[in-house]
Amino acid sequence: MVSVKDQIVLITGASSGIGKACAQLFAQAGAKIILVARRQQLLEELGEQLSKDFSCQLHLISLDICDRTGVQSAIDNLPEPWSAVDILINNAGLSRGLDKLHEGSIQDWEEMIDTNIKGLLYMTRALVPGMVTRSKGHVINIGSIAGHQTYPRGNVYCATKAAVRAISEGLKQDLLAEPVRVTSVDPGMVETDFSKVRFHGDTERAQKVYQGLTPLTPEDVADVVLFCATRPLHVNISELLMIPTDQASATLFNRQN
Ligand code: 8X3
């Protein structure tokens, strides 16, 4: 088993949900963490909490990963002690809308494509060259069951997660001669702000998504991310689909009411 102690871990979308849970778990395991998120206030609050709970070393970057030049310059300008990123957790992502494709909002599509695909690519493109040069690194993408199965009205969101799956596969192929690992952790239903964001803040509709069943928690997913990061170096977990016991496919759920 590999320890993440003193390894530099960059987490996107770190201020909430799966990203925040990863930050907590990796901090607890002694990693040095670069937290990337748009919301400065939430970043600072999380930073304070992590320093207090785990006295870990932290670097905060308030950034929208859709900003291509912003991503490159944030990575180019990482202070020296933070520049050799060992693990990139491409977690930032979102869904917007649950509409029939021919009735969908193009703005919603652009937001999902810009964050889930392009933002992930910008981060990967900025950080992987250093990993190759140092002969050390691991890219962990947070995919989704939606990348394996398209569900009604999921159209563009599912397409973005299918793209993440293809990007993970392609990156692994292109890094075959390098000791840099690539993993995709693909969760089913996880209770986060995911549905609230999908429904543009409609909390009542969001709550119904999780009604009558036990979804995964962000901590469940973070636990698996840490598992993947801590396998011996000759072991590459390429793709890991994890779903709640109350879920069997993207559309099959066991609800009690
Ligand atoms: C989130 C899982 O099935 O709600 O990526 O799209 S799902």
Image: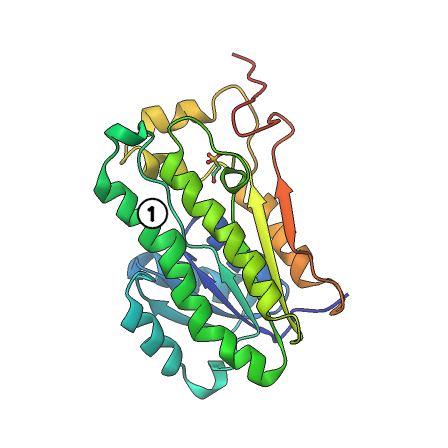
Point out residue 183 in the picture as x, y percentages from the top left corner.
61, 58
- In this view, the residue in front, 188 or 212, is 188
Foreground pick, 251 / 43: 251
Residue depicted at x 28% and y 35%: 201
Q: Quadrant of residue 44?
A: bottom left
On the image, which quarter does residue 49 sit in? bottom left
Would residue 73 be found to the left or right of residue 52 on screen? left
Up-down relation of residue 151 to residue 239 (above or below): above
Residue 29 appears left or right of 207:
right
Estimate the x, y position of residue 30 in percent, counting from the top left.
Answer: 62, 69
Dot 1: element: helix
Q: Please say whether residue 163 is visible from this viewpoint.
A: yes
Q: In this view, does 256 lie to the left or right of 16?
A: right
Q: Mark 1 points at which residue?
A: 112
Residue at 53% across, 34% down: 149
- Against 138, residue 218 (above or below) is above
Please name the amino acid that badge 1 sits on. Met
Q: Which residue lies furthest to the top in this view?
A: 257
